[in-house]
Amino acid sequence: MQEDFRLIVDIVVVLAAAAGGGFLAALLRQPVLLGYLLGGAIVGPAGLGLVKELIQVETLAQFGAAFLLFALGVEFSFTELKKVQGISLGGGALQIFSTIAVTTLVSIGVGWVTSPTQGVFLGAILSLSSTAVVLKCLMERNETETSHGRVMLGLLIVQDLALGLMLAVLPALDRPSEEIGIAVGIALLKTALLAGGSVVAGIWLIPPLLRFLARTESRELFLLGVVALCLGIALLTEYLGLSIEMGAFIAGLMISEVEYADQTLTYVEPIRDIFASLFFAAVGMLIDPLFIWNNLELILGLVALVFVGKFLIIAPLVRAFRYSLRTSLIVGLGLAQIGEFSFVLASKGQALGVVSRRVYLLLLGTTAVTLITTPFILRLVPRFFTWAETVPWLKHLLDGVDVPLEVPENVPTRNHFVVCGYGRVGRNIVQLLQSHNQSVVVIDQSEQTIQQLRDANIPYVYGNAVSLHVMEAAGVGEAKGMAIALPDPMSTRLCLKRALELAPDLDVVVRATQDKDIELLYQLGAREVVQPEFEASLELSAHLLNELGVPLPIIQREVQQIRNARYNTLRPERRPAQVSRDLAVAAQDMNSKWVALPEGSPLVGMTLEETDLRRLTGVSLMAIRRNQGEEIDYPEPEISLEEGDRLLVVGETDELAAFSELAKGEAAVPTENASCQWLLVPEDSPASGKTLAELHIRRQFGVLVQAIRREGKFIRFPNGSSDLQAGDRLLLCGNFHALAQASRWLAPNFEPQAAFNHQVEPNETELSLAQSVSGEVGES
């Protein structure tokens, strides 16, 4: 076969293999990068052998690496880096140097390398994590704007910046040991001169050139000019003894701050994606499955060492920068792999003779395995935290260290509004509330955001909005209302759940990032759920209808009807099976349990509104599965419970236990003649410091104390030995008249609020309770 035609066949085979592998990965909901690696391994010399000459394909693949780094440079944002500049710059540098130092010491100690130079090179490879895989996973879970998402991306940006420096220094490592210092110094000097020249060109040369290309109004000319600029600078750096990849990255940085950066990225992305698939497929062709199989134990051991070692370096570093333990653990697990750009370093190192062929193959195998396992680990992290909530000492550890990082003196403690998240939505909410002279407290854990709040003199609590300790510091228990505008669904759900633990009657409005979360958030207790895309549709439609002459009151009524119906008329119809699957996925991220209603349960025959499970036990009922197999997801309040029902409930361990007591009839259930009400025990209450057995509240007033809430902790269905303290909130159940009497005695200054369940007329004095153990619950 002619040489030129052989090249065409090889490129077609590699692209087809990359496309097939990428398609398979997409079907399995994995990053397509893993499919490219798999496709290359299958058609490469160690696989089917369809591509035997790698030199020409690798040459084209080098363009892929160059375009990858060029696009990375264009996308690089100093603004995004500033959001987490402390952990990014300080923590990122410490992480890289720590990884290199530890790897060098360990590799020399166990004999993996023969010189410190090789150890440093090995450490540089291991210090890089996968930007492509981590970013893909964060985007799939809508977590790019979360605390751990921002920290991950900040550290990855610094690692990508460090790659350029590593590529510059790498050629110096093949010199004799006595010349390495001089060679590294020369490489750093060249890098500094190149950086200085790039700054000058980026300010005075590149912008006029791009404007000139843009004025031609020709997409082809603009693209050709940008590609020529990228490859020209890449060849210049290669000529200077640095690397093509570093030059491409610098070219991207030069364009990143120009007004045509977005247009440049849009034009280059298709070329980047094609050549990048060639690059990763070419890397896959270098992977020898037989070598991996023959050295499987060693490679799996190296994978374990990489994960454990990087986790033990990264997680404590993030924690040292005052991030929560939960965030530190997620970041440590998320970045505990070797990145795709490590392939670039590894191939350069082998070409320069810094590492042997065997070490190079071990690196390739280890990197490939870590890239494959990372998405699975990130998906298991939420389930780990859900399981940890069921283990008392782990729950105490996670909650105990997740305390507020800073609470200023100007934070109001009563009759204020709490806003969780100070992004664009949260900022607007605060501005509108303050314009009506309302007290506001913001909860956020971004250091840059907190500085903005300081500058604006807005009361804040610096910490994780999901933490009960942070919520208590923000005075959630005494707040008028709360707005939750957090960027990811998981934090939103936990924040809502725990806010209602502190204040069951709190008016909470929540922003839903996805339409499938709307019913879930309502079921968890949100008073109002707002979905930005639907709200935009309503406002645009309202304007158009008003222009058509439809009366404004009619438009407002229709818009409100759509909101009251939870946007059902706008939401795409989903099959029940799809709703069940989405609910099952959401429940996995929370502490959930299917519970069968016991035979003779007092809950049988009651509607969900009558049971009011959330107030009595703290659980949220997400689904009902009937005996006949019918499943009712997100049941409405008027749904009645039936014999043999299985209920999907979400709550803390003690809340699930309380629900089990209630369902079995081991605790009193308020019936239609009873109302229940939360009451604050003040300092001057005669009940303060006494046990329920001493107070005889049930015998004296005919009401039950169903729960005690104290400092974020709940005592469900307390017995006679439970004591009351000033600041406790009691859940009292009885008829209206009895509740009023008990309230006046327990809290002389108490102002009656709306009770819940079935309110009755004041002249009804009978308290009807069902299925209490021996007719009483303790001596309450």
Image: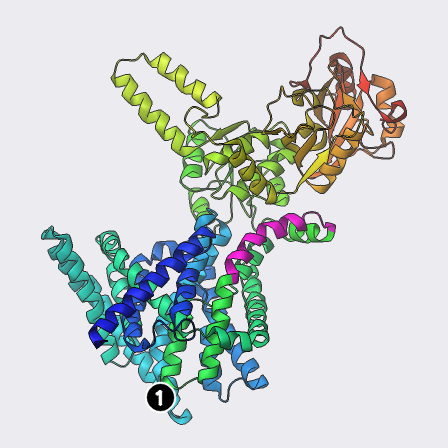
- Quadrant in which the C terminus appears: top right
Which residue does the image show at 41% across and 35% down from the upper left?
428
Q: What is the x, y in percent for residue 32? A: 41, 57
Label the magenta part by its dominant secondary structure: helix
Would residue 277 be seen by someone viewing this image from the given angle? yes
* Span colored in magenta: 373-392
Residue 621: give x, y in percent of width and height: 64, 31
Question: Is residue 170 on the magenta stretch?
Answer: no
Horizontally, is 36 left or right of 216 in the view? right
Residue 65 versus residue 667 in the image, above or below? below
Q: Amino acid at mark 1?
A: Ile
Instruction: Tell me if I can see residue 197 in this picture.
Output: no
- Say which residue label 1 marks: 182
Q: Nearest the camera: 261 or 29?
A: 29
Query: Which element is circle 1 on?
Result: helix
Question: Around disc 1, counting alpha carbons within 10 Å, would you say few (fewer than 14), some (14 to 19), or many (20 or more)?
Answer: few
Q: Residue at x 28, y 67 (%)?
A: 11
For residue 467, above or below residue 675? below
Give the number of marks.
1
